[in-house]
Image (tube, rainbow, N blue to C red):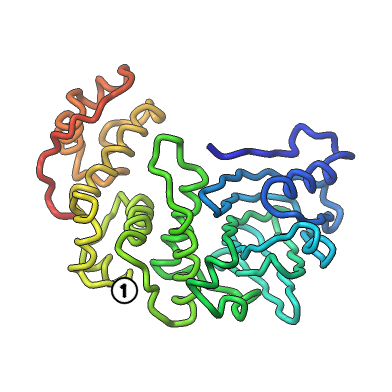
Amino acid sequence: MPISVSTDHIHPAERQAFWTEAISRSFAPVDTRPLGTAMVSGHFEFVEIGAAKLVRFDSSPQCYRRDARLVSRSGSDEFMFDFQRRGQSAMVQGTNEGMIAPGHGLLYDARRPFEDRLFGPEQRSEVLIATVPASALLRALPHAEQLCARPVPLSGAVARAIAAFIRAAIEAPAEQEAPDGADIVAYLAALLRVAAGDRHELSRSSLFGLLDAHLNASIATVRPAETIAAEFGISERTFHRVFADRDTSFERHVLRLRLSLFRQLLSTRREASIAALAAQCGFADAAHATRTFRAAFGITPRDSRSARGLTYQGSLPQPAKS
């Protein structure tokens, strides 16, 4: 489960010291200072997955700096990648400077001094941060050092899926399948390759995590397999083999995702109609959702709202292709 830290209950006079220490102890030894007159505030969720560290980071306008002294003291041997979600970031590392806005990302080398200023018109900035071992990233992408502090667009299907994967890995409940730290290195390398106009070079096993994140994000309107395959730069045959490697199919995996979301919404949105929730999950109509749900769980959606601990029975009907 993520470690969560917030300044909300810290006395204003003590917030900067608390915030700096919390960041430094958790994932990145840095010095911090506020920008402008905004009161220091922030919160982050942090998880470690193998040797990778993932963070969702939200703060008031602040400057985060690692000078030569801190680099030497921390013994850091990592690269970091920021996915900008709200506000803006201005990164300086050596002679490189990069400004990123929402929908962009940026790589920096934590083995060398850097300065990162986070700000925004709403006095908030939010980023997802993925930190990976330098040796692992350089094996996957030997010229990674040349790409630091250069804005990377996150507009393509692969980049959007990687960002969605990182966010889900931070927020995922404990019972979900944990991602592999090696996959996160592979995803960052792929993201940087695609930004340079190259192929992502992801293996089928790594592609499953991205396709799963993509389907979760677009579950209400999943497009045909051939369309998704083309967006991810793979053949339709390879696309289907990604799912076959997991002893399932594209169609059945989509149906499982829809059922999982439907079950979750039934318990969290009790005021919503079955038809509205079915549409949100991508079912054709309430009747289709009800039949599929009953086949999977042995109970109707309406009755499930008063039930607890549903067990998946695995008796899904053969789905039509999405």
Residue drawn at the location 76% of the way across and 57% of the way down: 74
Q: Is residue 5 above or below residue 82?
A: above
Residue 178 shown left or right of residue 99 in the figure: left
* Residue 8 picture location, percent across and down: 74, 36
User: In the image as oriented, which residue stretches furthest toward the right?
Assistant: 13
Q: Residues within 10 Å of mark 1 (few under 14, many from 20)?
A: some
Residue drawn at the location 30% of the way across and 31% of the way down: 273
- State the image quarter where residue 186 is shown: bottom left
What residue is disc 1 on?
233
Residue drawn at the location 51% of the way across and 48% of the way down: 49
Residue drawn at the location 77% of the way across and 63% of the way down: 71
Residue sitting nearer the eye, 193 or 265: 193
Residue 214 shown left or right of residue 290 in the figure: right
- Which amino acid type is shown beneath numbered disc 1? Gly
- State the image quarter where residue 272 is shown: top left
* Residue 151 picture location, percent across and down: 60, 74
Residue 309 shown left or right of residue 95 in the figure: left
